[in-house]
């Protein structure tokens, strides 16, 4: 039995599918079991509960061989990330009550840094809270999700431009597809290691690379161009981003561009992505 959080999302869903295909049994915890009805039909033991409730999390972890935990997204985090801190404390208590044989947690590239991370701060807090556990623990640090850039396909199709916060356009940044993350989570859950390990997951991709891949999917030339730093806040607001999201997003993008967030941390295991931007964008166009 393996516990998989976020089963209704991309990463958790991919991990659960792979485990089921390998003949493993899976358990999940969701707020609304109706949204996971398809998983129940596949034989997943779907429990109702909330990550803020350590008793519910502990009950879902009872007797599992391996557990995958992730924080839900906080699109408008309060100052100091109290939402993330509360869930990390819930996880710690649940893991104390019902320790699995091994744990895999979803973190992020850059989570090793002490601050200046913006949205990635939540992952740093998760690693800090779960690093001293008495059983094997693996933190998966993926690069920027490639799926986030599918939102730019429509504009690129109409204008021929991909406007990027990451800059300069020819500089590679760590990126990965969520399907690759889910597969790596499943691989780790059934594997074996001792102590704490950290996996950097993804490959270097530049905004120029993204633009070329968009062009392949769209059948027209697409070029990348940097959004001037002075226009970031206005650009995000024009896209409908709430004020609570803009500040941590800008801090995160500044950290990427400064090299503060990057792969190559000593002592980590490097795993390259297998899904290319061109493949992902072509799939998005077919959907």
Image (spheres, grey):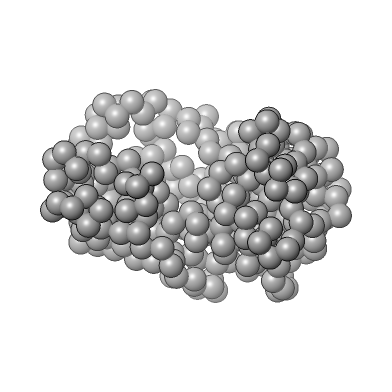
Nearer to us in this view, 260 or 13: 13
Q: Residue at x 60, y 50 (%)?
A: 12
In-image side of 35 versus 254 (left or right): right
Q: Is residue 111 visible?
A: no
Q: Is residue 152 visible?
A: yes
The image position of residue 220, as x and y in percent, is 14, 51
Q: Residue at x 65, y 66 (%)?
A: 188
The image position of residue 125, as x and y in percent, is 59, 47
In-image side of 263 versus 196 (left or right): left
Q: Is residue 227 above or below residue 68?
A: above
Nearer to us in this view, 78 or 186: 186
Q: Residue at x 78, y 45 (%)?
A: 45
The answer to which quarter of the image holds residue 148 is top left
The image position of residue 122, as x and y in percent, is 55, 44
Q: Residue at x 63, y 33 (%)?
A: 35
Check the picture and name the quadrant holding the C terminus.
top left
């Amino acid at each position: 039995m393996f516990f998989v959080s976020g089963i209704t999302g991309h990463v958790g869903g991919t991990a659960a599918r792979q485990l089921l295909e390998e003949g493993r049994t899976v358990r999940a915890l969701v707020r609304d079991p109706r949204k996971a009805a398809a998983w129940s039909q596949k034989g997943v033991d779907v429990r109702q509960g909330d990550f803020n409730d350590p008793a519910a999390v502990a009950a879902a972890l009872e007797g599992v061989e391996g557990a995958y935990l992730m924080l839900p997204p906080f699109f408008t985090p309060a100052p100091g990330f109290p939402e993330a801190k509360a869930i990390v404390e819930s996880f710690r208590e649940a893991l104390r009550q019902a320790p699995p044989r091994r744990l895999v947690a979803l973190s992020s590239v850059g989570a090793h840094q002490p601050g200046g991370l913006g949205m990635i701060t939540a992952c740093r807090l998760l690693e800090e809270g779960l690093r001293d556990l008495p059983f094997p623990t693996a933190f998966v640090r993926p690069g920027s999700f490639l799926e986030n850039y599918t939102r730019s396909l429509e504009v690129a199709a109409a204008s021929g431009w991909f406007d990027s916060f990451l800059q300069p356009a020819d500089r590679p940044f760590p990126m990965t597809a969520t399907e690759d993350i889910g597969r790596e989570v499943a691989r780790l859950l059934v594997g074996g290691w001792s102590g704490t390990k950290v996996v950097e997951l993804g490959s270097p991709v530049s905004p120029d690379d993204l633009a070329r891949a968009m062009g392949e999917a769209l059948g027209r030339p697409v070029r990348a161009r940097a959004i001037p730093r002075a226009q970031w806040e206005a650009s995000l607001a024009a896209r409908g981003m709430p004020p609570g999201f803009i500040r941590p997003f800008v801090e995160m993008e500044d950290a990427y561009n400064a090299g503060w967030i990057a792969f190559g941390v000593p002592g980590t295991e490097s795993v390259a992505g297998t899904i290319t931007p061109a493949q992902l964008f072509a799939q998005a166009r077919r959907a």
